[in-house]
Amino acid sequence: MTASPLNLQSIWAATAPAAPQLPELRESTRADVLVIGGGFQGLSTALHLAEAGTDVMLLEAEEVGFGASGRNGGQVIPGLKDDPDTLDALWGPQATAFAGATADMLFALVDRLGIDCDAQRGGWIQAGSKRVHLGGLQARMAQWQARGADVDWLDAAAMARATGACGYRGGWLDRRAGKVHPLKLAHGLALAAQRAGARMHARSPVGALERAGTGWRARLLAGPEVTAARVVLATNAYTPGALDRALSRATVPAHSFQIATAPLGEADLSRILPGGVCVSEIRRVGTYFRIGPENRLMIGGRGTFAAPRRPSDFAALEAELEALFGARFAGAQRWFGRVAMTPDHRIRLCEPAPGVLAATGFNGRGVALSVSLGKAMAAYLAHAEPLPIPPERRIRTLPLHALHRVYGGLAIHYYRLRDHLDW
Ligand SMILES: Cc1cc2nc3c(=O)[nH]c(=O)nc-3n(C[C@H](O)[C@H](O)[C@H](O)COP(=O)(O)OP(=O)(O)OC[C@H]3O[C@@H](n4cnc5c(N)ncnc54)[C@H](O)[C@@H]3O)c2cc1C
């Protein structure tokens, strides 16, 4: 008996209008700046460059939002994975201020452009289920509070009221945060970039990038070439090795799996995330959840390194959902996407050669970050404004990258065990 095929259409693809009609690139041409990759990073870079009057072209291999930007949890979370004090010490207070303002920036952009992407600013909770989590969460909250952020501590009772979930001992609420429909946001950014004058092309995969005099030449798989003075590699976890071997080896492309339930009834809606807040767990291998389109409950978490092939590949996530909310939910929609992970959970912003910029390794926290970073990269390219995070002069690759599935898979088992043993 053959297994029934698995439908992996995301809730976002099921509830967004069709992608904007962007043409394929058929003729060779030139641009001042070429952006490769049509996710939030590339779209925001192209938009802000076009608004600054720069001659910019964007090439996307599939449709805009095809990568992580059109598949994520839509949680708009400011900050990076490190605490603010650590960021100050690592990259300077300008990096911390930038990181703290990424959600403000995204929501302001959505407002300014009038993008219809179900934006809602209901806050975000980072939740701890073990006693050992609480000190770190409290310290992080206090550090943001000291910088004027609108944040609060929630004890176990407040966590139960805000989330409707069992088992959280505490967490911090960040009111700067919120949520969006990410695929609608990607579409809206693409249309805004096009209106601003960016030349936007879909179904136009770049096969190779090489030097051409003082600039660069991108060869498309279909034949045309684009020469450009400067290039932004915004392909992140979806970077093919042929395009940039080092960038494709700078991160471990891990899979994040997601489920959306059937629309919740009134009773569930009044107990589960009643204030519209999003939640991410602080566990090493934790889940994240929110209410999504059509009042569906959505949960995501780390999946296998191989692509899911059958519904049972999502069983662990379904079990998490049941454990959290004490009920089984019908009508699951299942999908997955690639997250670029780095061993230190830090972003890699690189300028590996004159005229080339690349950012990767957002470690599953890239919605607000990629949109904001795109704006900052555009300001750097158009007006030579300093980048908020100092760029590295080379792309650091991971040793034994070809074995990432093996050691990544082992690491997940190890971290799950450690999560289990924590108290
Ligand atoms: C399942 C999932 C859930 C997540 N949830 C959240 C969340 O709730 N909150 C949060 O902050 N972050 C989340 N993230 C992370 C976030 O989605 C990403 O960090 C962010 O979208 C990265 O944007 P990007 O533009 O850099 O990359 P992407 O959106 O991946 O864009 C890269 C693009 O490059 C294109 N491309 C690749 N190769 C080529 C080529 N050769 N030529 C042309 N184009 C090419 C790809 O097709 C792709 O569209 C999640 C990620 C996943 C996968």
Image (cartoon, rainbow, N blue to C red):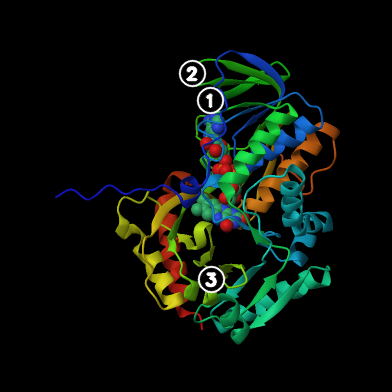
Direction front: furthest residue: 266
Amino acid on which the number 2 mark rests in the picture: Ala
**CA gap, disc 1 and disc 2:** 8 Å
Q: Which mark is residue 204?
A: 1
How far from the left and from the top, in percent, is residue 130? 54, 81
Q: Are the two marked residues, 1 and 2, in contact with CB atoms closer than 8 angstroms?
A: yes
Q: Which mark is residue 170?
A: none
Quarter, ligand 1: top right
- Which residue is identified by label 3? 283
**CA gap, disc 2 and disc 3:** 44 Å
On whether ligand 1 comes within 8 Å of the CB at mark 1, the answer is yes
User: What crowding class fits label 2: few (fewer than 14 Cα within 10 Å), some (14-19), or many (20 or more)?
Assistant: some
On screen, residue 288 above or below 184? below
Amino acid on which the number 3 mark rests in the picture: Arg
Q: Secondary structure at mark 3?
A: loop
Give the residue drawn at x 74%, y 30%: 196
Q: Secondary structure at mark 2?
A: loop
On screen, residue 77 above or below 397? below
Q: Are the two marked residues, 2 and 3, in contact with CB atoms closer than 8 angstroms?
A: no
Please identify, in this view, whether the residue under mark 1 or under mark 3 is nearer the observer: 1
How far from the left and from the top, in percent, is residue 75? 61, 58
How far from the left and from the top, in percent, is residue 28? 60, 13
Amino acid on which the number 1 mark rests in the picture: Ser
Relative placement, left or right, of 112 versus 221 is: right
Chain-order first, disc 1 or disc 2: 1
- Which residue is identified by label 2? 222
Give the residue drawn at x 49%, y 21%: 221
